[in-house]
Amino acid sequence: MVRGMYTGASGMRAQQWRLDAVANNLANVATDGYKRDVASFKAFPELLMRRQDDDGVYLHPFGSADAAPIMGRLGTGVELNELYTNFTQGTPRETSSDFDMMLEGNGFFAVSTPYGERYTRNGSFMLGKEGYLETKEGYPVLGENGYINIKANNFKVDDEGRVWVNAAYQDIPELLVGRESNQWEEPVLLDILKIVEFELDRYLEKQGSSFYRESQTSGPAFIASGDMRPKVIQGFIEASNVDPVVEMVQMIEVNRAYEANQKIIQTEETMLGTLINQVAKFG
């Protein structure tokens, strides 16, 4: 009976982990570039139940037969196996802002932070005070040659991540007033967005603010190229891949599973209490 309590307690603990993941997903349903967390579990090693003092053979008038001393297996509970990130593509959302970009396919923008290089799917960028392309937190977005120095209304990013600027007005933005945005002269390649990939991106570690960092399991970042390089779409943002309806259904399932394990413990406690009282009564 005590084993049943431990099994029920392990089930309750597992549902707590799952509830934390679901709650975090729901809290970030409106966060651009957020990727939902998924909790997976595994069973503790099962016990093989056997009858004691039984050689497995009994006799009857017509010969011998196997008594099947193995009674079967007994589960001993469950534990958290891993909490991983699901990197399925989020829904595109048009913003019409030149500073907003999204990646169509696997890959990450590289960002320079005080803690080292970090990676994100959130392409909601802005023009910093020093003229660099930055995240909302003020961290410079990296190109393959370093920081990207641009001016408002004077740059374009193609689907390969190449940043083009208008050479004639790069240093005189006032001349752009009253001109059509498509009237470009002498486009010059400024840099290429540093877009990276990993061998096992599901094992990246979340850092908050939609940032990730590499881990030993994910492997080091490498620049995505060829068929592995995602398409860059300017003027769009990738929304969260969290489906609130699915998460709410999972939250209901978690609550019911938690209550079921709680009732198991209560039943085991009642049975144990009855056994102790009966032993004390007839002891």
Image (spheres, rainbow, N blue to C red):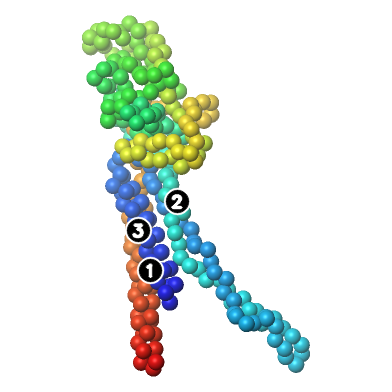
Asked if residue 210 is positioned above or below residue 184 in the image, the reply reads: below
Disc 3, disc 2: CB below 8 Å? Answer: no
Is residue 271 something one can see in this rendering?
A: yes
Instruction: Say which element carries label 1.
Output: helix
The residue positioned 31% from the left and 44% from the top of the image is: 29
Amino acid type at circle 1 is: Asn
Quarter of the picture holding the C terminus = bottom left
Find disc 2 in the rendering and name its residue. 82
Asked if residue 136 is positioned above or below residue 48 in the image, the reply reads: above
Instruction: Say which element carries label 2.
Output: strand
Residue 138: give x, y in percent of width and height.
27, 27
Sequence-wise, the earlier of marks 2 and 1 is 2
Residue 87: give x, y in percent of width and height.
43, 41
- Rendered image: mark on residue 16: 3
Amino acid type at circle 2 is: Glu
- Rendered image: mark on residue 33: none
The residue positioned 36% from the left and 19% from the top of the image is: 147
Find disc 1 in the rendering and name its residue. 261
Amino acid type at circle 3 is: Gln
Instruction: Say which element carries label 3.
Output: helix
